Image (tube, rainbow, N blue to C red):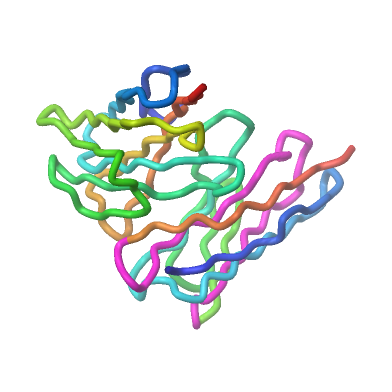
Amino acid sequence: DSGVTQTPKHLITATGQRVTLRCSPRSGDLSVYWYQQSLDQGLQFLIQYYNGEERAKGNILERFSAQQFPDLHSELNLSSLELGDSALYFCASSPQGGREDTQYFGPGTRLTVL
Amino acid sequence: LAKTTQPISMDSYEGQEVNITCSHNNIATNDYITWYQQFPSQGPRFIIQGYKTKVTNEVASLFIPADRKSSTLSLPRVSLSDTAVYYCLVRDNYGQNFVFGPGTRLSVLP
């Protein structure tokens, strides 16, 4: 158990809908990262937050957005969902978000878009 | 964008040493290289991290040459429970993008 929690574990929805994935980092960690894992694209970095502020941005679609709240939990919002958005979404956390930090991953949320 | 490559799959027998290499030609100058293990439908699990030369912990060793354009994860005396996918993670030198390798599926046979 990494100490990172993600809810829900599974999510099934329809195309065009909007969903919110939630992540609670390890106690004391200030930085949160979001990744998408699909069969054809592998593990793709989406976005990183540090203490509420966006720090780095990867291959995140404009239909997706994220934020980190004052209590340090983070939410990833996915809108206008398409079939291709079906994937595992992982959240990771690290103490400071610096170059020497280790990212610890949560168990993931499996999103299925029908 | 940085491109990382790894062998797609490897087979080994119990008790053998396994070495998995990741090539990362555009790694950020000051960033670390991290290796993860992943079982089906689970999150990646941290194995080891290093910046240069050699790092060893209780489960693995990591070898990084001076140019840092590759790294090799070494698993001593693998067991059946080491059957998993192994990924390297680096940050590319063009920005702040974290890049996972494509993963190496290790199968440990009895």
Q: Residue B9 magenta-drawn?
A: no
**Horizontal placement of A60 versus B60: left or right?**
left
Q: Position of residue A100 (x, y in %)?
A: 32, 58
Residue at the extreme bottom: B67
Task: Please tell me which residue is depicted at 57% across the width and 68% down the height of the picture.
Answer: B71
Residue toward you, A113 or A2: A113
Q: Residue B75 magenta-drawn?
A: yes
Q: Position of residue A68 (x, y in %)?
A: 18, 35
Quadrant of the image occupied by residue A99:
bottom left
Quadrant of the image occupied by residue B8:
bottom right
Q: Position of residue A3 (x, y in %)?
A: 37, 27
Q: Position of residue A65 (x, y in %)?
A: 25, 38
Quadrant of the image occupied by residue A90:
top left
Residue at the extreme left: A70
Query: How many discs mark residues in the rendered view?
Result: 0
Task: Please tell me which residue is depicted at 71% across the width and 52% down the height of the picture.
Answer: B76
Relative height, residue A54 to residue A11 (above, below): below
